[in-house]
Image: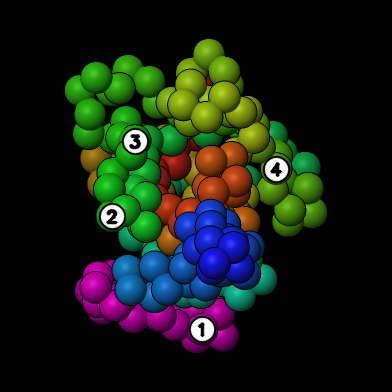
């Protein structure tokens, strides 16, 4: 009897291992890709297409080194961030918890957060990008209390232009990202949760 009670207690108090959490995360990402009708292309195919994704085909490129899936909706106007250059970048975004299929944050459409775009300082060091949020203007900082920009947010920097519209036809860069916990914000990292983002990037003054 005591053995049975002990086994039942162990079963009820089971804590997920990291491997089990990773498996759940991968399953959630795969389900999201299937449900959204996403066509995944390789980095080789992405390069052959001049680093573009066909939005009409709902293409995303899988960056194998990070596990980030990226769709470039618009490459943007202006110029890319040059080597050695530090630039203020203004972002508006929506953040969705893929596990729960629930939108968490939005300063792209939300009236309440419309005046709080995310401002970050981005530096290009020989093709490696680093960045930090401005605590005085950042919904991400206000929410997660960290100035660290999720690595997944920096994935597009190699491929997009960071500018400010000067002509009527100019559009700022826009991307969609599936970001695994290893490339995400602090909550994603600690809870092993993937997030989906739609982000626009504009050069600050």
Badge 4: residue crowd in 10 Å (few <14, some 14–19, many ≥20) = some
- State the image quarter where residue 30 is shown: bottom left
Residue 105: image tag: 3
For residue 9: magenta? no
Instruction: Tell which circle, 4 or 3, labels the residue nearer the N-terminal end.
Output: 3
Sequence-first disc among 2 and 4: 2
- On the image, the x and y values in percent for residue 43 come to 55, 80
Seen at 61% across and 28% down, the residue is 146
Q: Which residues are magenta?
A: 33-58
Mark 3 / mark 1, whichever is N-terminal: 1
Q: Is residue 45 magenta?
A: yes
**Residue drawn at point x = 73 percent, y = 53 percent:** 128
Which residue corresponds to mark 1? 42
Q: CA distance from mark 4 to mark 3?
A: 23 Å
Query: What is the quadrant of the N terminus in the image?
Result: bottom right
Q: Foreground mark, 3 or 1?
A: 3
Badge nearest the viewer, 2 or 1? 2
Q: Is residue 156 visible?
A: no
Find the distance from the CA under tag 4 to the CA under tag 1.
Answer: 25 Å
Q: Residue at x 31, y 53 (%)?
A: 100
Residue ID for mark 2:
101
Element assignment for label 4: strand
> In this picture, is 177 found above or below 20?
above
Secondary structure type for disc 3: strand
Residue 26 seen in the current view: yes
């Amino acid at each position: 009897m005591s053995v049975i009670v002990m086994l039942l207690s162990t079963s009820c108090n089971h804590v997920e291992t990291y491997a089990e959490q990773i498996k759940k995360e991968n399953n959630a990402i795969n389900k999201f890709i299937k449900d959204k009708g996403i066509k995944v292309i390789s980095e080789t195919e992405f390069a052959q297409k001049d680093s573009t994704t066909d939005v009409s085909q709902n293409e995303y490129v899988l960056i194998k080194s990070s596990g980030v899936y990226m769709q470039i909706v618009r490459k943007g106007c202006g110029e890319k961030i040059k080597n050695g250059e530090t630039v203020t970048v203004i972002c508006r975004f929506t953040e969705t918890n893929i596990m729960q299929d629930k939108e968490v944050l939005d300063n792209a459409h939300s009236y309440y957060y419309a005046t709080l775009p995310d401002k970050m300082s981005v530096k290009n060091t020989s093709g490696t990008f680093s960045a930090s949020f401005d605590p005085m203007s950042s919904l991400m900082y206000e929410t997660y209390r960290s100035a660290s920009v999720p690595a997944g947010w920096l994935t597009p920097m190699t491929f997009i232009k960071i500018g400010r519209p000067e002509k009527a036809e100019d559009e700022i860069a826009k991307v969609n990202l599936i970001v695994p916990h290893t490339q995400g914000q602090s909550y994603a990292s600690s809870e092993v949760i993937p997030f989906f983002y739609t982000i626009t990037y504009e050069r600050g003054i």
